[in-house]
Image (cartoon, rainbow, N blue to C red):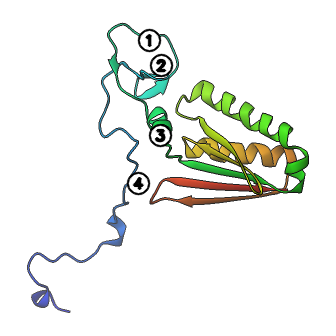
Amino acid sequence: MSKTSIPPGFHPIRHDRLLQEEVHDSYKAKGKLPEPTVCPQCNAIFKDGRWLWGDVPEGAHRETCPACHRLHDSYPAGFVNLRGQFFDTHRAEIVSLVRHEEERAREKHPLQRIMALEDVSDGVLVTTTDIHLARAIGEAVHRAYQGALDFHYNPEENLLRVTWEH
């Protein structure tokens, strides 16, 4: 194809400059929040570009944090399925490990929370406000008890499904 046959305004694709699509997450702030901002539900504070725990400053802007927003909407970012015969016989112990993993993560990351622990026909379904907590729970249970661990990430929905079976 010669240069004269290329229509005006047409630019060939440069593979070294392909743009990555942004992950669409309606729970992520559209712009920078004023600092400090406090969540009226959980008292997490947005400061230095991230959500933290701490003393609520006087006159802080008030806005619901993404975790409380997800909890209010019942819209999890992570699903962890725990199932199997071993799980059935060690249920209380494994659920205690899951709760401990949430507490550990939540100390440093206020947006990482368990939304619900639900009994399902073949085990327990844990829903989380954050994909990183779902992954951490799956990895903690796998480290402690082995078994089969599987991850399925859906980037279009920013959703992680974790399955652990033993």
Mark toward the start of the polypeptide (2 vs 1): 2
The image position of residue 86, as x and y in percent, is 89, 52
| Alpha carbon distance from label 3 to label 4 | 17 Å
Q: Which residue is mark 3?
A: 70
Callout 4 crowding tier (Cα within 10 Å): few <14, some 14–19, many ≥20:
few
Residue at 50% of width from left, 43% of height from top? 74
Cβ atoms at labels 2 and 1 below 8 Å apart: yes
| Alpha carbon distance from label 2 to label 1 | 7 Å
Q: Nearer the viewer, residue 21 or 103?
A: 103
Frontmost of labels 1 and 4 is 1
Q: Which residue is mark 1?
A: 56
Residue at 68% of width from left, 29% of height from top? 104
Q: Is residue 29 left or right of residue 5?
A: right
Frontmost of labels 3 and 4 is 3
Q: Which residue is mark 2?
A: 43
- Of the 4 image quadrants, the one containing the N terminus is bottom left
Label of residue 23 in the image: 4
Mark toward the start of the polypeptide (3 vs 4): 4
| Alpha carbon distance from label 1 to label 3 | 22 Å
Cβ atoms at labels 1 and 4 below 8 Å apart: no
| Alpha carbon distance from label 1 to label 4 | 31 Å
The image position of residue 27, as x and y in percent, is 40, 42
Callout 1 crowding tier (Cα within 10 Å): few <14, some 14–19, many ≥20:
some
Q: Is residue 26 left or right of residue 160?
A: left
Task: Tell me which amino acid carries mark 3.
Answer: Arg
**Element type at mark 1:** loop
